[in-house]
Amino acid sequence: MKRNLITAFMVLVCFLLQCTVFHALAFNGIIPNLMIVLTASIGVMGGRKRGLLTGFFSGLLLDVFFGSAIGFYSLIYMYIGYINGCFRKVFYPEDIKLPLALIAASDLTCSLLTYFLLFLLRSRFAFGFYFTHIILPEIVYTMGVTLILYPLILKIDNRMAAKEQRSAKKFV
């Protein structure tokens, strides 16, 4: 229960940071996707179900505040959280390469799906421009922020796991 509340708090904090602080730190209008970083990280650390739920609520916040239809980002982020949760068995907390690669792939997937489903269907065919001027810089910026944010998320998750283990030992 406590882990779910802390995860919900992290989703809210990342959303607020993405919408406020990082808009002020935007490079050519590009901001890092903190919701992808959080969803993929929680999915890798916590498994499919936690990743799916984190992705759903992250996407729902984006849908409510920025989406044209409720459910578009929720569905994309749910799949991203679930798929990242499938990598839990090969996850080692001290190795940042797997989460970094999964976050980059998740950001690329989210950006490509957004382009194909929101822009291409409206006859906007400037994929080369969109890819080089929006998708790639966003991935690079997101990776830079991931190097700072991921260890913080990992530390919070490890502390919660340690508290849960201490609490479970009291009842044995």
Image: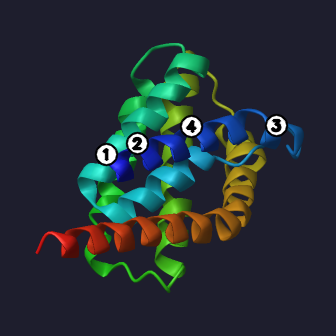
Instruction: Residue 87 in the image: state x and y as whole percent.
Output: 31, 69
Front residue of this view, candidates 92 and 6: 6
> Is 35 rendered above or below residue 99?
above
- Give the CA separation, mark 2 to mark 3: 22 Å
Residue drawn at x 24%, y 50% is 49
Element type at marker 4? helix
Q: Is residue 94 visible?
A: yes
Work out whether residue 11 or residue 166 is closer to the camera in this orientation and state it: 166
Expressed as whole percent of the image width and height from the top left, the position of residue 17 reads 71, 41
- On-image quarter of the C terminus: bottom left
Label 2 sits on a secondary structure element that is helix
Q: Is residue 7 above or below residue 117?
A: below
- Residue 78 is drawn in which quadrant? top left
Q: Which residue is mark 4?
A: 12
Could you tell me which secondary element the residue under label 1 belongs to? helix
* Residue tagged 3: 23
